[in-house]
Image (spheres, grey):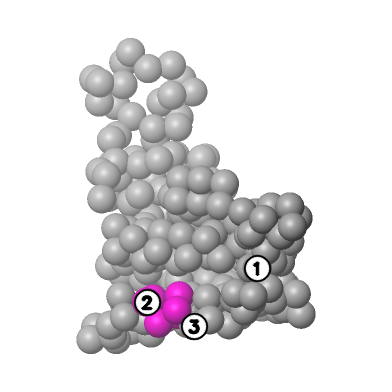
Amino acid sequence: MPQPFPATRNTDQSLTQAERTARAEAGMIETAIELLNTVGIQGTTLVAIGDKAGYSRGLVSHHFGSKAGLFRAVLKRITANWTADLHTALDDRTGIAAIGAAIDAHLAHVLRHPEYIRAQNILWGAALDPSSEFKPNVAEFMQIQRESVAAWVRGGQKSGEILPEINPQRIAEQYYGGLIGINSQWLVSPDFDLAAAYTDFKRNMVRLLSAPTTQIRKPDTLNREERQ
């Protein structure tokens, strides 16, 4: 995990104020993620973050306003990290190809950043509290993810590779719920076979969505038929 760099270090002297601010905030967020993974949400206080990252509590409060504000920033950072990985994996794919690529990319992301996944799930659990101040951030992220999946399904229906009777929104809910469930089990069960779960999930999703091959109109076949 990247280590935070206190703003007083000599290496910061050549940075602009905006760059120093961004550097300090990044360090505090990474420290918060580390604390969430080691001492949980109760132990991840502004004081603890300041002590571990080398800043004062007042500076942490200045940047994020409150503990809830800090957690919103943590969720934003984790979301941005995953979104970048997803966009790279998709490369303009849609339909079943997009769904398969996204599942593979998510497994790779989880294995590469387990600390992000654990911190994210800890905060998602806390968002279930009726008094949670960052619940809207979690709900917005989940909605965006569902909309992306629904768009892939509609793209596959347009090309004929996904069954037309499939409801894109319902599939998106099941898809995203499946990933959340798989990761929740893995986080609490050390012997859970994460890779196998992803492999089965991908296979079952493709099987559920795929239209019979006779319904898929391939361009070269169409051309031959149209010439006859």
User: In the image, which disc is placed on residue 204?
Assistant: 3
In 3D space, how far apart are the residues under numbered discs 2 and 3 (Cα atoms)? 9 Å
Q: Earlier in the sequence, mark 2 or mark 3?
A: 2
Q: Residue flagged by tag 2: what amino acid is it?
A: Thr
Q: Please identify, in this view, whether the residue under mark 2 or under mark 1 is nearer the observer.
A: 1
Mark 1 burial class by Cα count in 10 Å: few <14, some 14-19, many 20+:
some
User: In the image, which disc is placed on residue 216?
Assistant: 1
Residue 166 drawn at (x, y percent): 72, 78
In 3D space, how far apart are the residues under numbered discs 1 and 3 (Cα atoms)? 19 Å
Residue 8 drawn at (x, y percent): 29, 26
Residue 55 drawn at (x, y percent): 34, 40
Q: Earlier in the sequence, mark 1 or mark 3?
A: 3
Q: Give the residues in magenta.
A: 198-203
> Could you tell me which residue is drawn at 43 percent across and 16 percent down?
16
Mark 2 burial class by Cα count in 10 Å: few <14, some 14-19, many 20+:
some
Foreground of the two, 25 or 196: 196
Q: Locate the C terminus and report the quarter of the image it occupies.
A: bottom right
